Amino acid sequence: MANKLRLGIPKGSLQDATIDLFRRAGWNIYADGRSYFPSIDDGQIECMLIRAQEMARYVDHGALDAGLTGIDWVVESGLDVASVTTLTYAKQSRRKVRWVLAVPESSEYQRAEDLEGRIIATELVEVTKRYFSGKGVDVKVEFSWGATEVKPPMLADAIVEVTETGSSLKANHLRIVDTVMESETHLIASKSALADDWKREKIESIALMLRGAIDAQSQVGLMLNVRQADLESVLAVLPALNSPTVSRLSDPEWVAVNTIVEERVAREVIPRLKAARATGIVEYPLNKVVL
C-alpha cells in the first residue's frame, strides 16, 4: 500500500485562507462545500476538513497525522502534539490574533481584578480559567456557543473573545481590558507520525513550502542594471536578506543586481536606486522565499 499522509484542513473561518496558502505553496485543494474530504493534487496526501477547535484532539488520537490550527486551541486542549512550524495568517490579515478580555463600554470594570465573582463568557474556557486563577481572581467561566459579543451585560459581565482588528467588539459597544493570549496558526503533528521516517519527511516538506509561501507575502524581488563604477553606491541603498546577487553582463562595464526587499520599503528604495544611477529596475512578486 502506498504511503499516505492524513492532513487536517481547518473548516470555518480559516478554511479559505488555508486553501489559498496551500495554492501558493504548490498544492491545489478542491473543496466542493458538501464533502468533508476535499481532493488535493498530491497522491501522497489525504485531506479532511476539521474544526480548528478539534484539530489537536484528532492529531493526538492518531486519526490525523498532521493538521493546521491555532495554537490557542492546542493550549486549550492540553494535548501533547508537536508544533512543526508557525504560520502567521488569519481570516482577514497576516497578523497574530488576540484573545482579549472585554467589558461593556459603560461598565465600571477597568481591570481583571474588578471582575471578582462575575460571569465570563468564552469559547476558550480552560485558558480563561488559568488567566483569572493566575491573577487570584475568582470568577465563573461559562462556555459560549457563539455570538459571544452580544452577551454582556445581560447574559455575562465580561467576555474573552478572539479578535483581529477589534472592529466587532467596538460595533457591539465593548471595551478591551486586557489581552489574555496571542495566537497564530501552527502546523501540528502527532508524535507517532514524526516517528515514521516517511511521514516526518513529508510533513517537513509541507512545512518548508508553507513557510516559504508565508515569508514571500511581505517581500518582493528587485532586479536592475548598473555600471560597475556606480555599483558601490547602488549596493549601499539595498537592504537584503543576504548579500545581493551581482552578475556580469555582456558589456564588461555593466552588471545585473538581483535582491529581495520588504514590499513596504520598495517604494522608498526604487527612487533612491534611480538616483544612484541604476537602470532597468524591475519589481516582481514572489511565490515562496525559502531561507
Image (spheres, rainbow, N blue to C red):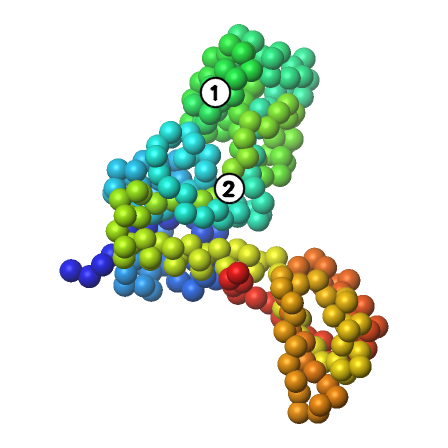
Q: In this orientation, which residue lies closer to the viewer: 188 or 144?
A: 188
Residue at x 67%, y 17% (from the top left corner):
110
Residue type, numbered disc 2: Glu
Q: Is residue 154 visible?
A: no
Residue 251 x, y percent position in the rendering: 70, 92
Quadrant of the rendered image containing residue 245:
bottom right
Q: Looking at the picture, does residue 189 appear above or below residue 100?
A: below
Could you classify mark 1 by the number of other residues whose Cα lies within 10 Å: few (under 14), some (14-19), or many (20 or more)?
A: few
Residue 219 x, y percent position in the rendering: 62, 61
Q: In this orientation, which residue lies closer to the viewer: 203 or 151?
A: 203
Tell me how far mark 1 sits from mark 2, CA to CA: 20 Å
Q: Looking at the picture, does residue 224 appear above or below residue 19?
A: below
Indicate the secondary structure of the residue bearing disc 1.
Answer: helix
Quadrant of the rendered image containing residue 173:
top right
- Could you tell which of marks 1 and 2 lies nearer the N-terminus? 1
Is residue 66 shown left or right of residue 290?
A: left
Residue at x 40%, y 62% (from the top left corner):
27
Q: Looking at the picture, does residue 230 appear above or below residue 243?
A: below
Q: Is residue 100 visible?
A: yes
- In which quadrant of the rendered image does the N terminus lie? bottom left
Residue type, numbered disc 1: Arg
Residue at x 25%, y 56% (from the top left corner):
4
Q: Which residue is mark 1?
A: 130
Q: Which mark is residue 184?
A: 2
Is residue 243 shown left or right of residue 50?
A: right
Q: Looking at the picture, does residue 78 appear above or below residue 240?
A: above
Residue at x 57%, y 66% (from the top left corner):
286
